[in-house]
Image (cartoon, helix red, strand yellow):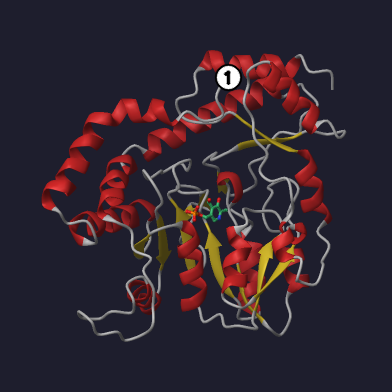
Amino acid sequence: MVPFLDLKRQHVAIRSSIDAAIAKVIDNTAFIGGEEVKNFEAEVARFLRAQHAIGLNSGTEALALGLRVLGVLPGDEVVVPAFSFVATASVVAGLGATPVFADVDLDTFCLDPESFQSAVTRRTKAVIPVHLYGQTADMDGILRVARKRKIAVLEDACQAIGARYRGKWAGTLGDIAAFSFYPTKNLAAMGDGGLATCTDRDLAEKLRLMRDHGQTVKYQHATWGTNSRLDALQAAVLRLKLRQLNNWNSARGRIASRYAEELGGTPLILPKVAEFRDHVWHLYTVRVPGGKRDALREFLTERGIASAVHYSIPLHRQPCFAFLPQRSAPRAERLCNEVLSLPMFPALREDEQEAVVQAIRAFPF
Ligand SMILES: Cc1ncc(COP(=O)(O)O)c(C=O)c1O
């Protein structure tokens, strides 16, 4: 059996230090805020070369608060890629604003700047480029359109911690960025967790207030807010894991290179790393041509090899967005029929990877 992702392997290797960090938080009984959260924010800001990092309880909350502090209001439009995890668009709808779906680039799977440009109207307030699978979107192209039209840029970096564009870290490329520490992510909490980063001090201050009921001093609330705090147990775990993140991302890179070498002669369309980008391989997602994706997936399952589809329905076709005017995004639709994610995690063994490659080579394309 080759698992798609085996979290236990990582945990076993760092169990004793995690146990000690958790025990310390419990002994101190400082469960909300405090030193662990503050230190994690400082350390992750340093890692990302970000001016400000604000710990939150999920990537979804980072996106939702990001939109709010960027001033997105009910009735505004926010351009999002039609090919992403649903949260990218549902946070827009959750504010009473309208997600406007633009198409993606077939090579990078990320928002296509031209499609973004044609989706812009007078009401466009923000755009959410998603750094999908661990590679940043074409930020030059997106920023060119956004700056000209005074559109705020909220990076969805939930899958891309450590990825870079022209040497700059994802999370420092737009106005605000959102990260997720969901347990499957490259930097993973032991539960839910998230982060917002930004350069502007006022935006950072607003995010800090908003995550804690707009509270300035105890029971004084300068603005209305919510409870979106990262808790101390998760922060303690994340601090430990952050120290390993570069090693883990490098291990992912080696696995991706081996897939590229060994699958190069097959009919699969392999993922490309575009100009100016460093990929962190949250997912290794290939395209299966000729309508054979589901058959290949079944073939692999029969041979004990797990795989996954990210994603099978484009956002504009999701039932939850049926109330919106229908738009077309033919490349997103095509990808939904072609993509297949192969096993990818830092502790994936070479013999397991070889089994994946051999099984794919045996498939009658
Ligand atoms: C692209 C993308 N956006 C947003 C999210 C939401 O993050 P979370 O699950 O931490 O709320 C995720 C992760 O699941 C994601 O992959």
The response on whether ligand 1 sits within 8 Å of label 1 is: no
Image height check: is 238 above or below 210?
A: above
Q: Is residue 157 visible?
A: yes
**Numbered label tally:** 1
Q: Secondary structure at mark 1?
A: helix
The picture places residue 104, in percent across and down from the top left corner, at 73, 55
Front residue of this view, candidates 91 and 77: 91
What residue is drawn where x is 58% and y is 59%?
87
The residue type indicated by label 1 comes to: Gln
In the current view of this chain or complex, which residue is farthest to the right? Answer: 290
- Image quarter for residue 295? top right
What residue is drawn where x is 74% and y is 60%?
319
Q: Is residue 67 left or right of residue 117?
A: left
Front residue of this view, candidates 252 and 365: 365
Packing grade of label 1 (10 A; few <14, some 14-19, many >=20) is many
Front residue of this view, candidates 228 and 187: 228
Q: Is residue 175 visible?
A: no
The picture places residue 116, in percent across and down from the top left corner, at 72, 67
Image height check: is 245 above or below 179?
A: above
Q: Which quadrant does the N terminus fall into?
A: top right
Where is mark 1, residue-wise? 353
What residue is drawn where x is 32% and y is 40%?
241
The picture places residue 34, in percent across and down from the top left corner, at 19, 60
Q: Which quadrant does the C terminus fall into?
A: top right
Q: Is residue 97 left or right of residue 64?
A: right
- Image quarter for residue 3? top right
What residue is drawn where x is 62% and y is 53%?
85
- Image quarter for residue 231? bottom left
